[in-house]
Structures are given as C-alpha cells and as structure tokens.
Amino acid sequence: MLPEPDPALCRELADDLRDAGYTAEALREAWGDAADDAIARGLRAPADRALGARDDAIAVLGRLFMLGMPQAEASVSLALPRTGVDGLARLGLVEAADGDVGPLAVVRPQSYADASASDGGSQWWIASDLDEAALGGPLPEDHVLGVGGASLTLAALQLPTPARRGLDIGAGCGIQALRARRSVDHVVATDISPRALAFTRLNALLNRVDGIEVRLGSLFEPVAGERFDRVVSNPPFVITPRVADVPAYEYRDGGMEGDDVVGAFVRGVGDHLEPGGIAQLLGNWETRAGEPGLQRVRAWVEASAVPLDAWVVERESLDPLSYAELWVRDGGTLPGTAGFSRLIDAWLDDFIAREVTEVGFGYLLLRRPAAGEPTLRRFESLHQALPGEGLGAHLAEALAAHDRLAVLDDHALAASVLAVAPDVTEARHHIPGQEDPTVIELRQGGGFGRALGVDPGLAALVGACDGDLPVGVLIDAIAELLEADAAALRADLLPRVRELTFTGFLRFA
C-alpha cells in the first residue's frame, strides 16, 4: 500500500520534474521515435541502448521512472535536488539500498490535447505501478494500471462543457478524474482498490489539482443517494472467466460474469444523474446466441429505472479467440510461457458456455433528460480509425445540435440557415469519358471521420449551405435546377439534413 502522500513533498517533486524538463517530448527526443514506440509494446532495451552512458537528469529519470531500471543514488539526488532519494522513498515511489535506487512505480509524463490551454495542449505526470517489463513477469492482481490507449480515448471523449459535480467510477491512477476537473468543479473518484485511490491522491497532488475526493467501494455503493452532473468511467469491463487459477486483475475485472459489469452500470447510472446530467464510459458487450451486442446494450438502456438518452458507438469487435489472446497477453502471460494455453482454454470455455460469438468494444454516452422523455436513442458501428483529437467537443456539439433539432418540425428546419462545417470535403468519382459522377462522397476531417455517399441533390444542398439562405429556399432552387418536384425533394432531403447536422457535416449558422 502506498503511504498517504505528503502535499509538500509532492510540490517539491513537481518542481524538480519541471526544472529537469521531464516531459514526454524530451524523453522521445532523448531515445528516439522507434524506441519510444517500443516502450508501449513492453520493450525497454532500445530506449536504454539509445541513452547509452548519458547521466543527465532526463536520462536518469527516464531510466528510473519510465523504464523501471535502478539508478545510482547520487545521480537521482542530482536530478531531483529538492525531493531527494529520501523524499521519493517517503512517497513510496522508490527504495534505496547499497547506493542504488530501485523504482517501485512508474511516473510518466503524459501530454494531452486541451482546447482551453493557450497552446492547445498540456501535460500531467501520472504515477502508477510498474509494468510487466520492469517486473520481469506477470502482473500482480492488485496492479494499478497507468495511462493506456483506452484511458486516453476516454479522456479525449469527455465533454469539455462546464459542470458542477462529477463522479469517476473505477478511478485507477486518476487520469479521468484529472481530466474531468478541467471542466467540473468537484469530482468524487471511487475504486474498489485502496492502492488505486492512493495513486489518485498522489497524482492529484503531483499535478496541483484540487477538488478531487476519493472514496472506496464498488460501482455506485460509495455514492448511494447522490446525484451528479457528469459521470465518467473506464470500468473494469474485461470479460474474465470466473474459474480458479485465472488471474482477476482489479484494474480490468469487475468480478461479474461476462459483460454484466457494463450492464449494471448502464441500468443503474440514471439514479445518480441530475436532470440533464451525462455519463460517459467505455465497455465491452457480447453477441450471445445470435443476439447482437448492440441490441443487448439497447436492452440495458431500456431496463434503466430512469429513462435515458443513449448514444452508443461500437468501435471494434473481436472473435472469442482474438479477445482471449488480447487479455491473456495483457496480463503478462505470453505464448510459449507456462499457463498461456490453459488461460486461452479457460476463456474459450467461458464464451462457449454463454454462446458468445463476438465481443464488441466501444463508447457509451447516456443522459438523463432535463424534462420529458428521451429523444436520442442511437446505436451504431463505426469500425474505422479516428482522425484525431477533439472528440469531446464533437460530442458536445452533436448533443447541442440534437437538442435544437428535436424541437424543430420540418417547416422550422426548412426555415433554418445552415453552413457546411469547415472540415468537410467532397470527392467525386467519374468513369472516364462520362460527365456525371458515379459516386459523390462527403468526408469529415474531424469528429468520427465519417464518409457518406450522397446523391446529386444532397451534394448540391450541402455545397450551397454557406450560412446565407434558408434550407427550404435552397431545396426549391435545387428542385428547379434538377427539374424535380420541390415538395418531394424536401421530403427526401430534410431527414438527411437532420442527420448531417447531428453528425457535424452541417452546422446552424
């Protein structure tokens, strides 16, 4: 168990790290792009080799806190003059013996995009447990995970709009609570792991972020009877066999069968949302006995005691074997090592018992309507690479567009003035020698990077939406050009205009 972090020591360590220039960019420059990418795959030798005999602060801290390699006590003292080795030991980050300092945790500089920052970005230092490369074997079951791809995805998905009270369920190292505090006044961070909550406290102090309160417990138990404006969770959603000799890692295993932990969250979160409150989480869902995973998620939403708006996006799906291999490897058990085949068999037996043929992964956004019944129920599969940052802002804009569209009938929508979003491009494909295109495609440069095939009428309307004339006037003009019936063209185009406005191709002027 980590000791209770000393706020003064955390401030000293932050000052030392800042003065040392301990940033993600500095480390990547020190050992090169290829070695930096290799670290994410559990390979630390290329980075160590690239540093060579360097003994400056970046090299010493990079080896100690990123690669998990012991360093000379004198070198660490020089790199962190305020904190010193004794201060690091009092924080539970290292142990010293015989002139060497051995790491007990990772302290990773983590850059992230932030539209509110003057340069569009910022950085945290995130402490977490040593990984399997540093440990030299499988992870312990109480391992506290650092910042991974899923963590960064959820952090990027968080809405940037202001809120008063927030809840982070399954806080882990605390990255979601830190991200939430940039727009939420006070955040309650919960976890079943006292060790995880200790890291959350440490990371809040290390990054000088106040307003984060930690509570021990599972799911909604620590906040019984309370409501929040914003809830975020990267829950322990990994589907794990409930049999002996299969490691139950606290950071990824919620202790329930199959995808039940995500189902329990969806069914229960409405009771803890204020009217207008929004919950965002990542999750897995099973396709069982022919019932598609997204249909199961829809059933969870409909089973909520509190009616909820829902927008669920499936980003990928895996067959049972691929899923099993992914998570057996994630725990540090590799092909060819003892127990790998046994663990794979346990996963496959578990899936067969529930007739699981596929496991989906994706994002869920749930909202308690401020008044009336839900108006948003959207369940979609988007199995393509995302174009980049800004998903949180995109989601916020889509919700705002949905709410505005929900109160507009077709007459009011036709009277609205729209403009094409600046990230939208059009591509036309022609058969050589033919004047008219065979395919017209609209592409989004941001958001979810959607690509849509459109017909000439819709392409003409999108191209004409420049924030000047109402949609209805434009449709009438296009009908005249195409020699089409104006009323029929309105009936055809207006539903698609709603979709394009929600998904961000068009915006209200």
Image: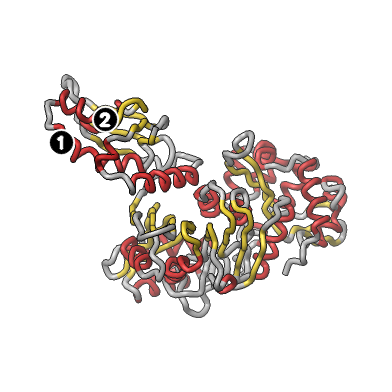
Asked if disc 1 and disc 2 are in contact, CB closer than 8 Å, the reply is no
User: Which mark is drawn over residue 461?
Assistant: 2
Quadrant assignment, res 347: bottom left
**Residue under the image location 72 percent in, 47 percent down:** 62
Q: From where the camera sits, is residue 312 visible? A: no
Q: Nearer the viewer, residue 386 or 45?
A: 386
The answer to whether residue 430 is above or below residue 443 is above
**Which residue does the image show at 67% across and 47% down from the upper left?**
124
Query: Residue 228: x, y in percent?
Result: 54, 62
Q: CA distance from mark 1 to mark 2?
A: 15 Å
Helix, strand or loop at label 1? It is: helix
Give the x, y percent position of residue 463. 30, 27
The residue at which mark 1 appears reads as: 487
- In this orientation, which residue lies closer to the viewer: 280 or 345? 280
Image spot of residue 416 (x, y percent): 32, 35
**484 left or right of 124 in image:** left
- Give the residue at x 72% y 59%: 202
Can residue 165 be seen by looking at this rendering?
yes
Tag 1: Cα neighbours inside 10 Å, few (<14), some, or many (≥20)?
A: few
12 and 355: which is toward the camera:
12
From the viewer's perspective, tell me whether residue 496 is left or right of residue 208. Answer: left
